[in-house]
Amino acid sequence: MFNFELVNPKTLESVPALLSRKWGETMLLAGGTDVLDMLKERLARPQRLINLKSIPGLSYIKAGDGLEIGALTTIAEIAENAEVRQNYAALAEAAGSIATPQLRNMGTLGGNLCQRPRCWYFRAKDLLCLKKGGELCFAVEGLNKYHCIFGGGPSFIVHPSDAAPALLALGARLDLLSGTGRRSLALSEFYQLPQDNLMRENVLGPNELISAVKVPAPAAGTKSTYLKFREKQSHDFAIVSVAAVLQMDGRICQQARLVLGGVAPIPWRVPAAEAELQGKTLTAAVLARAAEAATADAIPLSQNGYKVQLTRVMVRRALEKLVK
Amino acid sequence: MAKWKPLDQMTYLGKGYARLDGPGKASGALKYTYDLKLPGMLYGALLSSPHPAATVRHIDASAALALPGVKAVLTDVHPTGTLRYAGEEVAAVAATSPEIAADALERIKVEYDVLPFVVDLETAMKPGAPRVYTEQSNVREPRVESEGDLSAAFAQADVIVEGTYRTQVQVHACLEVHGSVAKWEGDELIVWDSTQGVYASRDGIAKFLNIEQSKVRVICDYMGGGFGSKLQAGRYSAIAARLAKATGAPVKLMLSRPQDSMSAGNRPNLLAEIKAGATRAGKLIAFSAKTFGTAGIGNNARPALPLVYDVPNSRTEHYDVYTNAGAARAFRAPGCPQASFVMEQVMDELAEKLNLDPLDFRLKNDSNQTRQQQWKMAAERFGWSRRAPRPNASRGVIKRGMGLGAAVWWPGGRGTQAQMTILPDGGIEVRCGTQDIGTGTRTLVAAVAAEELGVPIASIKAMIGDTEYPYSGASGGSTTAPSVAPAIKNVAEKAKDKLTEVAAQHFGAAKSEVQLADGRAFVKGNARNALSWKQLCALLGTMPLVVHGEWVEGLSSAGVAGCQFAEVEVDTETGVITVLRMLAVQDCGLVLNRLTAESQVIGGVIQGISYALYEDRLMDPLTGVLINPTFENYKIVGALEMPKIEAIIYDQPERGVIGIGEPPTIPTSAAIANAVYHATGKRMRELPMTPDRVLAVLHS
Amino acid sequence: MQDQNESPVPIHDTAESPPAAAPSSKISRRHFLKLSGGGAVGTVILTAGVHAKAATLPPDAEVFSGSVSLQLKVNGQRRSVTVEPRTTLLSALRNQLEVTGCKEVCNRGECGACTVLVNGKPVLACMMLALDAAGKEIVTVEGLVQDGKLDPVQQAFVDHDALMCGFCTPGFVMSVRALLDRNPNPSEAEVRQAVAGNLCRCGTYPRVFEAALAAAQTAGKRG
């Protein structure tokens, strides 16, 4: 690990000023499970780490008219929270599917949303891939079974977060704080494709941070779930995941939100599939059409065509689980 | 010839009992090589080549040396400077902390002349592929073996099957990485090494350093797994010794996890083109295999084909292929799991063509009498008769199937020496230069000694893992138990004999009249007037009794059989294979410790499941690096994937001690693959059977 | 782990001008080799990190740099260590305090061998800074032993042979102990979930499940 100075601030308001306005010079430390990995591989070389855990009051789950979760809340706390499990099942299930018990006790919601890609070329210390300032994305012609089938180019990473697809499907917003003040941003506006910004997967500014995540109260008749496909159940990132939120009126779907994880550089909403569901009685045939529509735009690479099939199956199964 | 007591007269052997070092392992008290911290010790680290093929033009270590805390940099650790795989060691440092050592590695400037490379087996075989060794072709001369008249046999065969099979490269992934702590005392070197053979390590280190064997002592008290990858000395041990010499301080040098994956051995892959024929009567009569495999820059990727079954006419033609990847090393049952994956599927295919149950076909072609019994016993216990006669019988998306495969292993063991010291206060020390690689060897040393002397196991101090102790070979090939147990029994018999003499003198009786049993000595027929163990040993006065023993004939043998049955579920929409249950029946002669023997079998099955479904070392064709060197993407089976595993030890105490390490991992992937075929009607000819491959086959 | 700042290797920041076109699908091998042989590979470069102009620190913030002395409360004892900000809890425990029950296996949070309890919860010592553990209750596998007597979980691992080479064992013991502390009577499925982050290479998993369930019978909750 490259050495750094560690700053323990006491107030949230003091953080933006501690962050450099130049990328790479400073980093935020929360659960540390991704940041320390980046530092150990020397993929990041900040001069200063700002330790958010020293700030009181950033870890909480408030339920009332909607849900508010402090950015420093651990994944385990979210997975185990009764209110989240009751009314925001997709989020609870997503949180429960993340990594391992130990890592869920360490990792935080803010960190999970901001984690860097797991692409093996990006994480390989000695390889200068496109996202590290190199000239090519090795996944194009190299080993790409875990890479994206949607939204690729010029880099073909997938976004590794499980919490993000669930929160996006639940219509979450982020409270952000920067040197210029606070803002609220829809999670749907937070992530950006490599074609828009190759170096960063989200729109946070260099001296900006997430302070809280807000989820609107679900409308009556809303059900949600998160299904995650892994090569092995014990500790694995998603190959494909599906967050599904349905607002039902009897057997008729009023509104549907479907967001895929593990298949695109950002959490990938599939409006075409949602459209197949909205206003319809959810019969098996309707679900199958939605599953089909979810992958209509997929462009697989040489070794990840199976993800298209998996996506279809996982979408259908997630919907079946909710309709049952 | 020496003989064991009957099982019913044994206190420990044949039964199950906890291992002696269990409390120390469970409480974290035991020190492994990685845990050692000697006074003044420095931390070593290796700089690995990022290039799969290159020559080193120049190394500038000045910036590293200038870093505070860096005590030495070696720039000549590679013997030739011609690097043949990404991960080969280029330079080494010693520093006051592991963190500073890592900083120092970054400050070493290396100029490379980068060369063309090839990391893929089939690409390396193509004409014009970059050569791994400039002086020779990547495809080596074949090794051909043949028996009988193959073409006549194929002409005579009623059914013939043909197929191409592929297996992957598997890395050992020992949880304790390879590494050593080296310390000089004058011109004598002590190395604590995470090794499967203290003597092998000692000899290798002496050779690397060009010093006498008598100047090197190797110690391995506890080690975190080897599986064949730690049977030889590593270059890192010699580098640690050189760093220690250069700095005048002890040095600990452990590989990083990626370095361990890149450079510390692997099981070679396999490409096998198979043809086999059988008669309508159900006899396998012809088998031919043309095989290719890469052991990276090393040699011997040959599969053990044909495996298990009798085949009078056969021909195998094997080609080792060089690639720019780390050299293979022995890996639990070398050449066998990959051969089993092929052989057992070929057997199933023939059986199907003959309209025979796969089990019946095996019974007709397996001349091993033990396995004949095991097949029947296992089939009954597993419920094989409930197996659907046809493949792909389940309706619906999730399909179930059953499959089987055979285990086999050949070597016995010999050559171990041991020393026993009986102390005047009753203490018992056994010294033996073997080592415990997690198999329970320390416990077996104590148990055999305790059994022979009739004392509690806890009263034995088992001293192993040190070249100061009498010679024993490296722990590989399931040779340890059959080589160590007889030597311990032999040395204990000799000590018992001497103590009987001492007691006879005390009682004024003839030696033949004196009996030593249950830790007491008495004149036969007068057990009430016995000497306790302490009283007996006190008669030694001030001089301990020291006896030497060695491996003797009659207490061990070689050659085991076994079989495994698998039941799986295949999700035909996702390609996920779930192993529901495994049954393994395995013999190992006289069981020394039923608890640890069963653990070995369970562990072998689990490694087999991992090999079958998850593990795959991936070399990147674009950059030539090992792209999944850590456990994130080198996927090893975990707790949530565990099926129900039943391990049954098939007792044959009359055969004496036989090893059990290798065989139980051999047929697991084959049994699973056959079960997948039975479930789906589609044959998986490539490992690992990951969802992408399963889907591809199901939709083909 | 909220790391929104990156530019992982300080080569040049292309963020303002990302390459517009997707890479050609016909990259020649020669092209890459030239790239990889050109010395731009990470191992050969390093200059000291960019020094940010220190922003004004708020008066109540603590700043740690260079060598830092601190106390860690390990297994009920206060132990002094001198660390750098980057020193992990695992490194401090093993290399300084010689508390080596927590094992270093992957050093990347992928195996669970370094599992320790921090304020009662199982976490990975390799992915936590030592400075972050200051003031917290740290329990390692050694700390479960009371007056020389093994914890019931440890004893069950011994009795059920839930250990072979033993290198993963302390991590499994801590995960099981943490489970029983919060759920004294778990199902096998709950045991499996609790140790899903612990990797074993010898193949002890089924024995671990047996041991955990047996330990729950003998003494679930610690006194």
Image (tube, coloured by chain):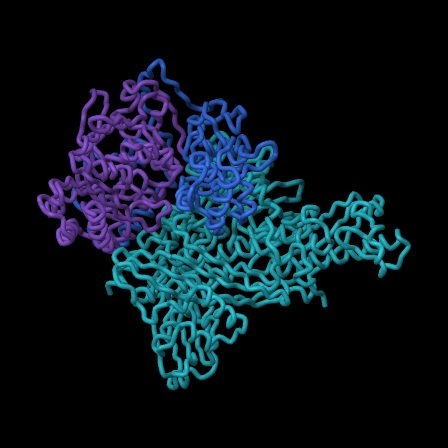
Task: Give the number of callouts.
Answer: 0
Quadrant for the C terminus of chain B, please: bottom left
Colour of the chain lettered A: purple
Return the residue found at the far left. A279
Q: Which residue sits at x=50%, y=66%?
A: B562
Asked whether the viewer can see residue B102, the reply is no
- The answer to whether residue A311 is left or right of residue B292 is left
- The part of the image, by quadrant, that contains residue A5 is top left
Image coords of residue B491 (percent x, y):
73, 56
Return the residue found at the far top. C59
- The answer to whether residue B174 is left or right of residue A114 is right
Q: Which residue sits at x=38%, y=67%?
A: B386
Chain seen in blue:
C
Image coords of residue A209 (percent x, y):
26, 27
- The answer to whether residue A324 is left or right of residue B405 is left
Asked whether the viewer can see residue B92, the reply is yes
Image coords of residue C33 (percent x, y):
31, 51
Chain seen in cyan:
B
Q: Nearer the viewer, residue B129 or A120?
A: A120
Q: Which residue sits at x=9%, y=46%?
A: A280
Q: Nearer the viewer, residue C76 or C114?
A: C76
Image coords of residue B677 (percent x, y):
33, 66
Quadrant for the N terminus of chain B, please: bottom right
Return the residue found at the far right. B508
Q: Nearer the viewer, residue B176 or B17?
A: B17
